[in-house]
Image (cartoon, helix red, strand yellow):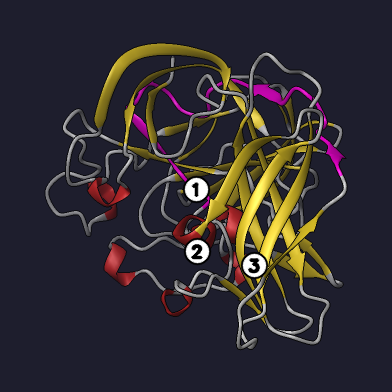
């Protein structure tokens, strides 16, 4: 990811006891040499979990009997290693004990699959585009789990929302409430690989103002969208597309770089942008997100503090060209 070998995964922790448990610390260990790869505790651990709550900051992650939580792990791996094994050491307390004692659980080692992600062409032209996502946002792509027949899916595990910026870090001109004033609105959306259109949706209307946008059901959250099949169990999703802009239909073959639609503001959206992800089946909700990279992009900088997004220009970095990489969270990039 932007030049650093990165591993993302979800760790689900169950409390199978009859007592409350406070998880105080998670250590991720390399069992081959017992070195500490990563450690989360305190506020950082809470941010990484789906149990984040200001009222629990002093107590850690509180699990009731037979309860569970999800911890969203992001690891920067050593580029010199190719065969990775990891194990988890969890430290916890019983909050109802008069004298607090810390216990621990050490998991069995597991092997990290060393597989190369998909390499895709650019879904948009030029830029600058901010690649908006974060594993720490409570309603971010990676935190949205959809359940069907008792099985959970995370379709947007590696998803990016692309928002067009100007050179001053603004995403809209004049009145931001007008959809058409956003710089990305109406921009051409491109096929990222040769493939066959698996499905399209074209019936979702669009508000001309952000303030007039209404909540929609989960089935309509993607808005107008295209699903492009590029291989076995590989479907590229383009969501929130502009009404009447989709140029393809199901079953149609497309070539890499073909214009297939225009960026819009349909479905569940806070502003015009392109939602982009790859999944293992042709379903917007009940599919697993799979990793991908882009053939080439130029890194301009990013927003380490996302509250400054759209208010200030991004934190500039020395321009660097990346090939076969995925932008890091909230980085600003140029496509060819």
Whether residues under marks 2 and 3 lie with C-beta atoms below 8 angstroms apart, the answer is no
Q: The C terminus lies in which quarter of the figure?
A: top left
Residue at 67% x, 61% y: name it: 91
Residue 119 drawn in magenta:
yes
* Number of marks in the rendered image: 3
The magenta span reads 109-135
x, y (%) of residue 205? 46, 63
x, y (%) of residue 256? 63, 19
Residue that label 3 marks? 219
**Viewer-proximal residue among 129 and 199:** 129
The dot on residue 210 is none
Residue that label 1 marks? 241
Residue 117 drawn in magenta:
yes
Residue 70 visible, this angle: yes
Element at label 2: loop
Which secondary structure is most common in the magenta stretch?
Answer: loop
Decide: few, some or many residues near mark 2? Use Cα within 10 Å; few <14, some 14-19, many ≥20: some
- N-terminal of the pair, mark 1 or mark 2, is 2
Q: Is residue 40 left or right of residue 289?
A: left
Q: Is residue 172 left or right of residue 235?
A: left
């Amino acid at each position: 990811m932007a030049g650093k070998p990165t591993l993302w995964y979800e760790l689900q922790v169950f409390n199978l006891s009859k007592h409350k448990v406070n998880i105080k610390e998670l250590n991720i260990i390399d069992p081959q040499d017992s070195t500490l790869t990563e450690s989360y505790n305190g506020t950082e651990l809470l941010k990484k979990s789906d149990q984040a709550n200001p009222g629990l900051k002093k107590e850690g992650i509180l699990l009731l009997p037979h309860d569970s939580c999800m911890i969203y792990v992001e690891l920067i791996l050593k580029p010199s290693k190719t065969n990775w094994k990891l194990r988890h050491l969890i430290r916890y307390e019983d909050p109802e004990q008069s004298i607090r004692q810390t216990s621990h659980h050490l998991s069995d080692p597991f092997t990290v699959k060393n597989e190369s992600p998909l390499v895709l062409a650019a879904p948009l032209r030029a830029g600058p585009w901010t690649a908006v996502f974060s594993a720490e946002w409570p309603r971010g792509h990676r935190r949205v789990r959809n359940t069907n027949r008792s099985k959970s899916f995370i379709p947007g595990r590696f998803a990016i929302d692309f928002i067009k910026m100007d050179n001053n870090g603004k995403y809209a001109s004049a009145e931001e409430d007008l959809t058409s004033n956003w710089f990305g609105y109406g921009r051409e959306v491109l096929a990222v690989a040769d493939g066959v259109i698996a499905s399209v949706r074209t019936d979702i209307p669009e508000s001309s103002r952000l303030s007039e946008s209404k909540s929609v059901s989960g089935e309509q959250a993607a808005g107008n969208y295209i699903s492009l099949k590029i291989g076995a169990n590989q479907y590229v999703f383009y969501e929130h597309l502009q009404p009447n802009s989709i140029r393809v239909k199901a079953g149609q073959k497309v070539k890499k770089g073909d214009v297939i639609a225009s960026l819009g503001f349909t479905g569940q959206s806070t502003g015009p942008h392109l939602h982009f992800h790859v999944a293992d089946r042709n379903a917007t909700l009940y599919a697993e997100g799979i990793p991908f990279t882009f053939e080439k992009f130029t890194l301009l900088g990013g927003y380490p503090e996302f509250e400054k997004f759209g208010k200030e220009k991004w934190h500039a970095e020395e321009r660097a060209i990346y090939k076969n990489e995925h932008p890091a969270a909230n980085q600003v990039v140029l496509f060819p």
